Amino acid sequence: MAREFTSVGVVGLGTMGAGIVEVFARNGIDVVAVEISDAALDRGRANLTGSTDRAVARGKLAEADRDALLARVDFAVGLDALHAVDLVIEAVPEHLDLKQRLFAELDRVCKPEAILATNTSSLSVTEISVATARPNQVVGIHFFNPAPVMKLVEVVRTVVTAADVVADVEALCGRLGKVDVTISDRAGFIANALLFGYLNHAVDMFESRYATREDIDAAMKLGCGLPMGPLALMDLIGLDTAYEILDTMYRRGGRDRRHAPVPLLKQMVTAGLLGRKSGRGFYTYERPGSPKVVPDEQTPTTTEPAQRDAAVTKIGIVGSGTMATGIIEVFANAGYEVVSVTRGAEQSARVFEAVQTSLNKGVVRGRLSEADRDAALGRINWSATLDHLADVDLVVEAVVEELSVKKALFASLDELCKPGVVLATTTSSLPVIELAMATQRPADVVGLHFFNPAPTMPLVEIVRTIRTSAETIATAQAVSATLGKTGVVCGDRSGFIVNALLFPYLNDAVRMLEASYSTTDDIDHAMKLGCGYPMGPFELLDVVGLDVALAIQRELYLELREPGFAPAPLLEHLVTAGYLGRKTGRGFRDHTRR
């Protein structure tokens, strides 16, 4: 029988602490909210009333319920007010010595049976617990920001945390309407261990000027469906907080270089550029605490929408796979004349049928009129020979992802196509410069990496090599805009933006599973409910295909030579066993039983 928590204490009433107070009070539990001074207490009270007032204004909380919620909270200065509570959660700054001193004092003040909990996101719960005489009653209860909204709670047990304490906290999470995942005490737990390596890598991309802040953020939002781009998310979290979490993970997590804070991060923290809370971080905000981004010296100067390049009217598309089919549909729908080149009449017939089926679905769903469908089909010319590309203005290749095949194709296009034609590859991982140098016109070669399914995915990565001309990039940007896509420009590096940030995160999730730290379900829950990701890493891997993920991760590792990017052995073993995900019926999960 789980113990009944009738009153809880919360120490520290910043954004997170006030949010935790709100969570408990919303669910009928009396709360003693504690700060170190009257001024800090007033700020904490303002945080709580501001949050509940906004909930009322948005129709998510009745005025009577807000008043009842606030009546359940007793604000106090000093820890002595916590002498009778059943549970205390601290949400003070992420400094181990501060938390240890606090827990030693809580151990003295609180009744013997009270559970002492930390909301730390990265520090060792074990090291905090040994500051008390009751380490078996110390546990991590890691809420996510904003606590009233985010469904996930990580329950962190140490090697000495009593089983009944863990069970009681799990039951409490259910009472609060939260989904809990119970894990052992390891740097970063689940969500932060997976999230912050990705965020740090994004900062490294920005620091090296590989891509602009806007393009990095747009790529991850539009290419992966994430609620926020990584640099905007860093600003929301706070760069000082992010630095402390990364530094702790680096020191506690085996000194993985990918968790060593990027130098730019420390410089920005030192300069007081902490993100939203200071009014400036990677972006500049209207005022400290405001979510509204305002222009600054790094804001792109081009405000007018890109105009259609009048010189590009006829498009050649080479390939007969899913990606080629989608790209044909995208260009034909946008009003371009298209020449589709496959290896034979049979492949052309299959591509035609696939394009027609997709367009018919658009008509059924009301996104396209019958006249528009017929016009799009009428703009497509079908061919089985490259010779018909002699008069096109842009060629997009979407053939098999093998370097030798693509190089041979680009050499042929160089001979056949008229001067000035842009030659584009849809490769997702191969070096574009290798293809460019297979031609006598490397300045005209560019990467146009569409995402699958091309008709619906709004992102195109425009990949420039060191030989690509500015005119070619401008043409690629104009064409992307005409297609209704957001084009993000990046350098010719393995994985470009999206795959270079996404697949190491997926590989880290596999390593976490491989180490038996958590389960596929709990890791997926953590990233969906704690970070707002549309899919958990194992759901996504099964959809993408484990063989595809392994191939991309191998390319990243071979180019960057970063030990942390080496493919997880478990991923390699599953691919060897033929467990490739949904397409074979089994990957990290068995899909034949669903």
Image (cartoon, rainbow, N blue to C red):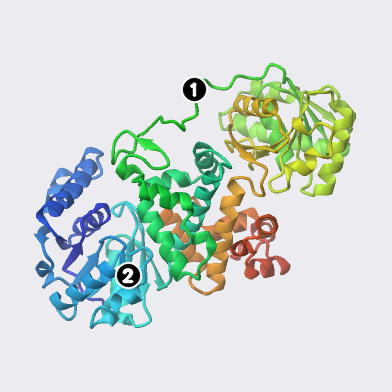
Please, what is the three-letter code of the amino acid marked with disc 2?
Gly
Q: Earlier in the sequence, mark 1 or mark 2?
A: 2
Mark seen at residue 140: 2
- Total label count? 2
For residue 576, side relative to residue 167 (left or right): right
Quarter of image, res 186: bottom left
The label nearer to you, 1 versus 2, is: 1
- How far apart, in angstroms, are the residues tagged by discs 1 and 2? 48 Å
Q: Position of residue 359 (x, y in %)?
A: 66, 31
Q: Position of residue 57 (x, y in %)?
A: 22, 38
Query: Label 1: which residue?
Result: 303
* Residue that appears at 17% across and 74% down: 105
Whether residue 68 is situated above or below residue 511 in the rendered picture: above
Q: Position of residue 139 (x, y in %)?
A: 31, 73
Quarter of image, res 584: bottom right
For residue 28, side relative to residue 314 (left or right): left
* Residue that appears at 56% across and 60% down: 538
Q: Secondary structure at mark 1?
A: loop
Q: Position of residue 255 (x, y in %)?
A: 50, 68
Viewer-proximal residue among 120 and 162:
120
* Residue that appears at 23% across and 75% down: 115
| Residue 233 shows in this picture | yes
* Residue that appears at 43% across and 68% down: 187
Cβ–Cβ under 8 Å for marks 1 and 2? no
Whether residue 461 is situated above or below residue 13 in the rendered picture: above
Q: Secondary structure at mark 2?
A: strand
For disc 2, the neighbor class at 10 Å (few under 14, some 14 to 19, many from 20) is many
Please, what is the three-letter code of the amino acid marked with disc 1?
Thr
| Residue 228 shows in this picture | no
Viewer-proximal residue among 275 and 167:
275
For residue 177, side relative to residue 421 (left or right): left
